[in-house]
Image (cartoon, grey):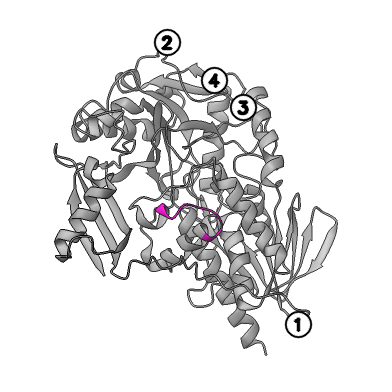
Amino acid sequence: MQLQFQFSPEEAKDDSFIRSAISRELKLPKDHPFAYKWHKRSIDARKRDIKVNASFEVFLDGILPPFEAEFTPRKVTPDSKVVHIIGAGPAGLYAGLRALELGLKPVVFERGKDVRSRRRDLAILNKEHIVNSESNYCFGEGGAGTYSDGKLYTRSKKRGDVMKALKWFVHFGAHEDIIVDAHPHIGTNKLPQIIVAMRDCIIEFGGEVHFESKLTDLQIVNGAVQAIEINEKELIPCKALVLATGHSARDIFYLLKDKKVSIQAKAFALGVRVEHTQAMIDEIQYHGRHNDEFLPPASYSLVTQVADKGVYSFCMCPGGIIAPCATENGEVVTNGWSPSKRNNPTSNSGIVVSVEPEELPNYSPGNPLVSLEFQQEVEQRCWRSAGGTQAVPAQRLKDFVEGRKSKDFPRTSYQPGIVSVDLNTVLPDFITKRLRQAFLDFDKKMRGFLTNDAVLHAPESRTSSPVSVPRDNETCMSVNTKGLFPCGEGAGYAGGIISAAIDGMKCVDAVLKYYQSDN
């Protein structure tokens, strides 16, 4: 049975208090044995008297049932149909795991390196400012998700089975708290071993995972995929291709355009990443409480409308750091992540403006890459403005709103460093105007948010793909290329780890139907 309570943060951490509350609610005799586990947990900090919304599953026989992941892989056989998967991010890995459940053989090609080798390239990026275009924060085993915090919250309940996706994470090593918490989070420090466990499972059951294996060409005959080329040399026959390359694989969009696969420019978002001290965010959100052992580091979610366009917080990272996420030399990009304990002294969040293709200077209906080109131009301009390294242009928050170049800065978590630049002169005018008004609006919602102790880092530009790859709603297949299944964030069908994972599973379900319909 399930029971619901509202506790103080202190009570919610006290097992004896919880057991007493359950016993009283059920009117159990003294010393009656029972077991319980958390079902759902969320913080209600709207009022000064902060509460924890607590839901428990209670077992009167005193026995906790074992965890069930609902993951039932099958061993690949010589008769198993093959599904080729491009990309080993959340969409690609979940596509591979789902293929095993359906009796298909997954063959995964990842342009980047395995997660352990990838760390060395990230260290070089942070310390020496050298971007490896095939191994970085976006490309490599686990994709952008591996080193982008591990937040698992999604509003996309209609996309598929969120709980199943979360349970698979637990099966491969995540803590069961991700099933309980309203805004589940794994942490960048714990994700790599989970990703490796997923890869090992794919291989153990007969699938394949190939690293440093980049899709360089598609062979399409009579409107259907016939073969794929890897690393400009290996041509592999292919009938079903799940394209899960993520939102930053720009070369793939150019390839699709060249091969006349239908693609479209889409709306995306662009802005800055703002960094406050975590203590300041805690004090604002928790009504003066901070560094409180009974409360998690506070987060926030902000949204406003400026000139009929949305401006909102994106990927808020309590107790986190800002990381360099460029995929080519000659550009800078910021993103944020948090370790599992979220115990760094600063918090950060993207603050981004919705951008429609039609409002871009070079827009034309016949250019599906107009949003991508605009995104790239901003990243390159920011790179030049900060001196042509992975240091980013930065400005204190209040200085930005009031149009002053910052003279100095508090310590930043961005390891490659920052350079004082008036962001109003670097970012597009329609972006900065909306950002300035949004920060004024946000300060009304979170008093103290607009402070010169906060620092803006630019740009935050990889919130989502600037290109979509249209597919049929029923078959998940490209609208003009048979056997091609555009998947996940890169194709425009997901917006985070969980929604990408769910879309990976959905696409492989569609692959099975495609094979069945061909028999």
Q: Nearer the viewer, residue 452 or 21?
A: 21
Q: Is residue 206 magenta?
A: no
In this view, 69 is above or below 324 = below
Q: Nearer the viewer, residue 263 or 151?
A: 151
Residue 313: which quarter of the image?
Answer: top left
Sooner in the amino-acid sequence: mark 4 or mark 3: 3
Sooner in the amino-acid sequence: mark 2 or mark 1: 1
Q: Secondary structure at mark 1?
A: loop
Are the residues at dot 2 and dot 1 in contact (C-beta closer than 8 Å)?
no
Are the residues at dot 3 and dot 2 in contact (C-beta closer than 8 Å)?
no
- Tell me which secondary structure the magenta stretch mostly adopts: loop
The residue identified by callout 4 is 417
Sooner in the amino-acid sequence: mark 1 or mark 4: 1
Q: Quadrant of the N terminus?
A: bottom left
The residue identified by callout 1 is 79
Residue 408 shows which numbered tag? 2
Let me know if residue 492 appears in the view: no
